[in-house]
Amino acid sequence: MIWVITGIATGSGSSEGCEGLTGDSLKLCEDAGDVGTTIGVGIVVGFWVAVDVILALTYLIYRLASRQPRP
């Protein structure tokens, strides 16, 4: 969660790479930075979901393997 919040916070605002640009060039540069931030946050969330699924499957397999057989 901290990675997502930090990624969103650092991605907002004018980036240092866009210094000296004006008009459409500045807008394009800032929009490109926003797209990069969105992709980065999406990757972090995707990894988070993947790890949750792996942990859930591992727990389910463990529970099924350790249950007592029915008489």
Image (cartoon, helix red, strand yellow):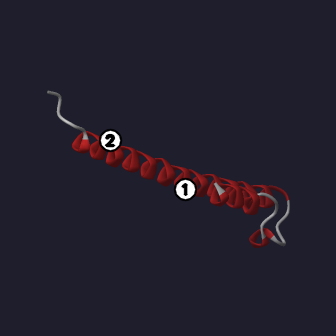
Q: Position of residue 38 (x, y in %)?
A: 63, 52
Q: Quadrant of residue 11?
A: bottom right
- Give whichever of discs 2 and 1 has the lower sequence position: 1
**Crowd band around label 1 with a 10 angstrom C-alpha radius: few (<14), some (14–19), many (20+):** some
Picture quarter containing residue 28?
Answer: bottom right
Quadrant where the N terminus sits is bottom right
Q: Is residue 50 left or right of residue 18?
A: left
Residue 58 versus residue 4: which sits nearer the camera? Answer: 58
Residue 65 rendering spot, x and y as whole percentages: 22, 44
Give the vertical position of 17 relative to 30 (above or below). below
Pointer 1 residue? 44
Give the label, 2 or 1, closer to the camera: 2
In the rendered view, tell whether residue 65 sits above or below residue 43: above
Which corner quadrant of the image does residue 61 belong to?
A: top left
Q: Amino acid at mark 1?
A: Val
Instruction: Tell me the SS state at disc 2.
Output: helix
Rendered residue at 39%/50% (across/down):
55
- Distance between mark 2 and mark 1 Cα atoms: 24 Å
> Residue sitting at 17 percent across and 28 percent down?
70
Category of crowding for the residue at label 2, using alpha-carbon neighbours closer than 10 angstroms: few (below 14), some (14–19), many (at least 20)? few
Q: Nearer the viewer, residue 29 or 46?
A: 46
Q: Which residue is mark 2?
A: 60
Question: In which quadrant will I find the C terminus?
Answer: top left
Counting every numbered tag in the picture gives 2
Three-letter code for the amino acid on which mark 2 is drawn: Leu
Of the pair 65 and 17, the residue shown nearer to us: 65
> x, y percentage for residue 36?
62, 58
Q: In the rendered view, does 68 fall on the left or right side of 20?
A: left
The image position of residue 30, as x and y in percent, is 75, 58
- In the image, is residue 17 above or below residue 63? below
Secondary structure of the residue carrying tag 1 is helix
